[in-house]
Amino acid sequence: MKRTDYYPGIEHEVRTHEESMLEKYKAISEKYTERFKQLGCEVELTLFWYNEKNHEVFRVRPELFVGYKSAVSCEINKNGKMVCVNPEDNSALSASWGVCSITNRIGFFNLFHPKMNVTFYTDTSDAAEDIDQLLALLKEYPEVDNNWQ
């Protein structure tokens, strides 16, 4: 994890980091491609963004703002739709990993001159375990209904 002050022009660094992390997660997920194919499914990884303050989700990268968060979404799809293992509570086979966030810096001196922190997340160690769990769930519920969307 790397934390830095927000500065004009950091947008490029944020975009570069997001794309780099997506590629790292794709490399991890590629090790599972064949196992999911054997079960008639595929792994789809995409970037998404959301506003932590109002929980709005964006599929297209918005401008940077306080409350901005980006993440990589890992969805298990079958016939082009996300797989659902429990239609009663819409339990979809998916995981996500944080990539970047922008927050206000907290402190007495920042009351009058607020500053923003940008955090770049770099730890991918949970990804393989998460994908293993998705695979195990898919094997546990092989006859899932993926027409719930």
Image: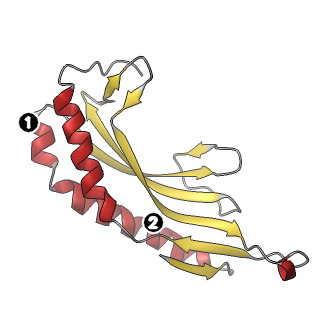
On screen, 130 above or below 139?
A: below
Query: Looking at the rendering, which quadrant does residue 26 occupy?
Result: bottom left
- Circle on res. 119: none
Q: Which residue is mark 1?
A: 38
- Residue shown at 42% from the left, 22% from the top: 149
Closer mark to the observer between disc 1 and disc 2 = 1
Q: Is residue 120 left or right of residue 25?
A: right
The amino acid type of the residue labelled 2 equals Glu
Number of on-image labels: 2
Q: Which residue is mark 2?
A: 18
Query: Looking at the rendering, which quadrant does residue 23 occupy?
Result: bottom left
Give the color scheme: rainbow, by chain, secondary structure or one colour: secondary structure
**Where's residue 33, x and y in %?**
15, 48
**Where's residue 43, x and y in %?**
25, 44
**Which SS class for mark 1?**
helix
The amino acid type of the residue labelled 1 equals Gln
Q: Within 10 angstroms of label 1, few (less than 14), some, or many (20 or more) residues?
A: few
Q: CA distance from mark 1 to mark 2?
A: 30 Å
Q: Within 10 angstroms of label 2, few (less than 14), some, or many (20 or more) residues?
A: many
Mark found first going from the N terminus, 1 or 2: 2
On screen, 49 above or below 75?
A: below
Q: Is residue 73 left or right of residue 120?
A: left
Q: Is residue 17 left or right of residue 31?
A: right
Q: Is residue 94 left or right of residue 62?
A: left
**Which SS class for mark 2?**
helix
- Residue shown at 19% from the left, 29% from the top: 140
- Residue shown at 23% from the left, 54% from the top: 29
Query: Looking at the rendering, which quadrant does residue 22 occupy?
Result: bottom left
